[in-house]
Amino acid sequence: MGIHILPDTVVARIAAGEVVERPASVVKELVENAIDAGADDIRVECLESGKRLIRVTDNGSGIRADEAELAFQHHATSKLRDAEDLSHIRSLGFRGEALASIAAVSQVTCVTRHHEENSGTLLRLDGGKVTHQERVGRPPGTTITVEHLFAHVPARLKFLKSNQTERSQIDNLVTRYALAYPHIRFTLIHEGRVSFQSAGSGQLRDVLVAAFGGEEAAQMVPIASDPLATITVSGFASLPSLDHANRSRILLFVNGRPVQDTRLAFAVIQAYHTLLTTGRYPVAVVLVQLPPEEVDVNVHPAKAEVRFRDADAVFSAVQRSVRRAVLDHLQPPEAPSALPQAWRAQLAATSPAALTDAQPASPLQPQAQPPIPGSERWERVGIARQSSSGQWSLPAAPVPPPPAASSNSLPALRILGQLATTYILAEGPEGLYLIDQHAAHERILWERAMAQLDLGQVPSQVLLDPIPVTVPVSGAHLLEMHLETLRAIGFEIERFGNNTFLVRSVPAIMFQDDIAAAIREIVADLEEGDAVLQRDVEAKVLRRVCKRMAIKAGRVLSLAEMQALVRDLEQCESPRTCPHGRPTMIHISVATLANEFKR
Ligand code: ADP
Ligand code: MG
């Protein structure tokens, strides 16, 4: 046989093989089209596990009468215009290959009505060629019926598995999409009987109950990550009471697309480190959302694989939020601890209105220990900083440039206890962590302060009585010079005498500090260094404030306090060093331990 170009029909069948492998792949493509069309009610009907018939009905946008035939041509799509669009795909489809490929290997009937048109279109195709077209009535939406799949492709037909296998492929597929799109009502019908239905309530918990049953759903807990982060993770993960013999029940979705990704599945498994017996695997539905330009979906014909621009970041986001979800449920915070109240007290203290009636910091109040400054939640501020960072140069002082976030960020940790009232012992997926409570808290307060500074709103607290502070003559001039700068970070100070100043308000975080001592320290700092630029001065002063307010070594911490502290540390951009560049923690890996024990 000499070299020749294959006829179109043969080319089409070869191409079809890449997209359409089995009945479930037809269901997948048709369901994706329905989702892309904005449907909130999708019905999938099958006869003989889809070998004889697959019908997908949706109430989406429908196809215009004059475009119906076009939709079945190769590379015909409404979802992509140019090569540039490929880098930020928001729809599930984009190749314009599915309908053409399906039509090439089956008999297709399409009945569709575009929502802006008065009548619908019926189109019949056999082996990819239109055999019949007419106008029909129907409500807006689309029904595509695929019959006699692979009837003309004996090679394919031969490789189809038993009805049972093909059917379970379809079942898995439909439940997956139902989990990823809780606001869509999915109905799956085999041989005329409803075998699965989701409510379309918008609640993933409802779909879990429909898909896995109430008993399993009750043993799963919601996964949550910071909703404002670039990579968000949601879904549900099993508590250790529910596990599985293999990893097949770890369901992963990236931007609403079910994906197979060994690494992401591994991230989920890692999140259960030491929580499950070896050889047992979690059950999880993990939905990752990230900007479309961060992920390449165009690497696999069936789009089941994706490639991430920063795979490490996705890995750690998944591992961290799943572990967090599970640990939070395993370790309910200690019985009514003093801490939450202390947080509330401190929050109240920052609002001027609260000052008149509530005096949380009163030394007369019986209080075992003062609350930890800055221990209220502050993720939102932290995130705002990410988005507005870059507006100012890093302080010249010894803040190390943050290394790549992924290598630097912390996994979710489980608190084991406190050592020498100085260190927090915690366990993570990669071993033991010894955290210096003072350095860690300093880091937390510092990042928070910087974030507030970026936003231009460092909370300030007016003192009931202004406090006079006398500073060395040498420093008085310097302090005077920086009064405006200090105002930006919450200090209201005015000159009162030669080298005496009156402090009227301070950053809210300092509400328990010895103000006079603090100001003298700050003046000493200013004298010592060479900070001239406003940002350098601000950073320098705030670094001192954070150091003063960070909890000290020697303080006994409750479990709840340690959990709160470590959680705040996990949120930090550079959790592994304090603002002065010293380590906040020592990490001893499981491998190191094994080595030491000569195991
Ligand atoms: P792709 O989804 O990659 O664009 P398809 O071959 O699956 O390619 O579909 C081709 C086009 O047909 C789509 O871009 C869309 O405009 C239209 N289409 C297909 N199915 C539907 C549907 N259920 N509802 C509305 N439009 C549809
Ligand atoms: Mg499609």
Image (cartoon, rainbow, N blue to C red):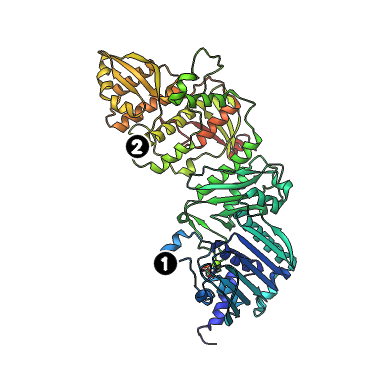
Residue ID for mark 1: 82
Q: CA distance from mark 1 to mark 2?
A: 40 Å
Which is nearer the eye, 61 or 193? 61
Q: Within 8 Å: ligand 1 and the Cβ of disc 1?
A: no
Q: Amino acid at mark 1?
A: Asp
Q: Quadrant of ligand 1?
A: bottom right
Where does residue 262 sit, x and y in percent of width and height?
Answer: 59, 54
Q: Mark 1 vs mark 2: which is more N-terminal? A: 1
Where does residue 515 sit, x and y in percent of width and height?
Answer: 39, 17
Q: Is residue 125 above or below residue 42?
A: below
Q: How many marks?
A: 2
For the residues carrying marks 1 and 2, which lies nearer the camera in this image? Answer: 1
Residue ID for mark 2: 394
Q: Residue furthest front?
A: 118
Q: Residue at x 69, y 58 (%)?
A: 197
Q: Amino acid at mark 2?
A: Leu
Q: Residue at x 62, y 37 (%)?
A: 327
